[in-house]
Image (cartoon, helix red, strand yellow):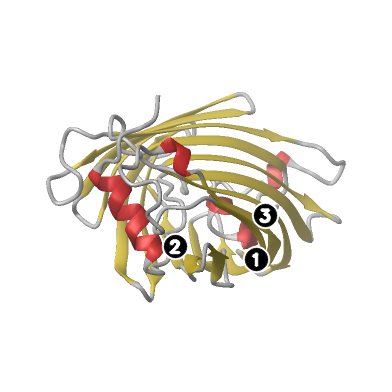
């Protein structure tokens, strides 16, 4: 059945029609894999890594954002470089963006850390399907279908050690617009990320890792994530976080052999969309020794 136009769908569509840029997909499990936000992380742990991530934001709200992300990255050439692939599908109401990009990272080994520079390039396909809506006036020029593919590129830098990680990135450097039906729609603008985390060892088995993520876009206020995470034997992890103090969440993950499983539950407040619409994020990851120069003993404990 066709979805009834809800307030959130109207707001999303109207914002596109007046050329306001859409935000990048939101992730809560970047602690488990910073590669989703920074191409410089490709190959950083000297292993082959793959991850599948699914996010259902504001469950139960018609037109809510839904994001799927598959990525794989590995160190290459004696662990001196990294190579990665990422496929993303992000949908909000009738608007869907599908992105494929390839990342390259060059690593410089320092005394007790690795400095990595990353670049990525690929294509984003933007589509809008008004058949997902029930429109009272089908001839309204503000409602029309479009589909357009554009090139994009991104860059990042990251400093990684056993204790800390600091990174700065812009996954999409080129603002993207589509022109359909006589309208110019700005679909994406530049979003800049600063990520930092430090690990404190409370005992031989337990560690504490506070972290922060700052997200900046010229068209929107600064977004701030604050995280507090505990780890047992670097295998069982649990933590709390907040985004702009109007969304709170619980993050848990565990590692079994070469697999990592993660889950996030987010609870918005009345300053967001209201307490009735929770968000859920699922993740499964795999880490393998794929080349002879891959060595688990060289993997950063971070």
Looking at the rendered structure, the secondary structure element under dot 1 is strand
Q: Estimate how packed mark 3 is, as few (under 14), some (14 to 19) or many (20 or more) residues with alpha carbons within 10 Å.
A: many
Q: Quadrant of residue 58?
A: top left
First in sequence, mark 3 or 1: give its number. 3
Looking at the rendered structure, the secondary structure element under dot 3 is loop
**Quadrant where the image shows the N terminus:** top left
Q: Quadrant of residue 119?
A: bottom right
Do callouts 1 and 2 mark residues in contact (Cβ within 8 Å)? no
Asked whether the viewer can see residue 116, the reply is: no
Q: Is residue 251 above or below residue 191?
A: above
Q: Nearer the viewer, residue 61 or 184?
A: 184
Image spot of residue 227 (x, y percent): 32, 50
Instruction: Look at mark 2 in the image and give the residue it sits on.
Output: 195
Image spot of residue 4 (x, y percent): 30, 34
* Residue sitting at the far bottom: 218
Q: Mark 3 against mark 1, which lies toward the viewer?
A: 1
Image spot of residue 84 (x, y percent): 72, 51
- Specify whether 8 is left or right of 235: left
Q: Estimate how packed mark 1 is, as few (under 14), some (14 to 19) or many (20 or more) residues with alpha carbons within 10 Å.
A: some
- Specify whether 224 is left or right of 297: left
Instruction: Look at mark 1 in the image and give the residue it sits on.
Output: 152
Q: Is residue 205 above or below residue 117?
A: above
Distance of mark 3 from mark 1, alpha carbons? 18 Å
Q: Is residue 131 above or below residue 163?
A: above
Per the rendering, the mark at residue 43 is none
Total tally of numbered discs in the picture = 3
Do callouts 3 and 1 mark residues in contact (Cβ within 8 Å)? no
Per the rendering, the mark at residue 42 is 3
Looking at the rendered structure, the secondary structure element under dot 2 is strand
Distance of mark 2 from mark 3, alpha carbons? 15 Å
Q: Estimate how packed mark 2 is, as few (under 14), some (14 to 19) or many (20 or more) residues with alpha carbons within 10 Å.
A: many
């Amino acid at each position: 059945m066709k979805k009834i136009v809800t307030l959130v769908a109207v707001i999303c569509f109207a914002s596109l029609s007046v050329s306001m840029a859409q935000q990048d997909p939101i992730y809560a499990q970047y602690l488990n894999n910073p590669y989703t936000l920074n191409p410089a992380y490709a190959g950083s742990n000297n292993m082959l890594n793959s991850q599948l991530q699914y996010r259902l934001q504001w469950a139960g709200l018609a037109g809510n954002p839904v994001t799927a992300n598959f990525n794989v990255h590995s160190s290459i050439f004696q662990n001196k470089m990294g190579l990665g692939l990422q496929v993303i599908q992000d949908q909000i109401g009738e608007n869907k963006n599908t992105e494929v990009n390839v990342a390259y990272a060059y690593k410089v080994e320092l005394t007790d850390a690795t400095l990595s520079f990353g670049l990525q390039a690929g294509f984003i396909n933007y589509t809008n399907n008004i058949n997902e809506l029930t429109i009272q006036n089908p001839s309204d020029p503000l409602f029309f279908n479009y589909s357009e593919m554009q090139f994009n590129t991104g860059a990042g830098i990251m400093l990684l050690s056993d204790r800390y990680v600091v990174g700065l990135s812009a996954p999409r450097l080129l603002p993207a617009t589509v022109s359909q039906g006589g309208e110019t729609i700005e679909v994406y603008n530049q979003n800049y990320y600063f990520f930092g985390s430090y690990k404190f060892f409370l005992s031989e088995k337990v560690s504490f890792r506070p972290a922060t993520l700052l997200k900046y876009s010229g068209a929107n206020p600064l977004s701030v994530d604050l995280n507090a995470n505990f780890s047992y034997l670097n295998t069982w992890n649990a933590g709390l976080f907040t985004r702009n103090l109007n969304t709170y969440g619980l993050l848990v993950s565990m590692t079994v052999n070469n697999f990592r499983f993660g889950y996030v539950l987010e609870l918005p407040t009345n300053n967001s969309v209201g307490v009735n619409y929770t968000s859920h994020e699922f993740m499964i990851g795999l880490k393998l020794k794929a080349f002879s120069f891959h060595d688990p003993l060289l993997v950063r404990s971070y």
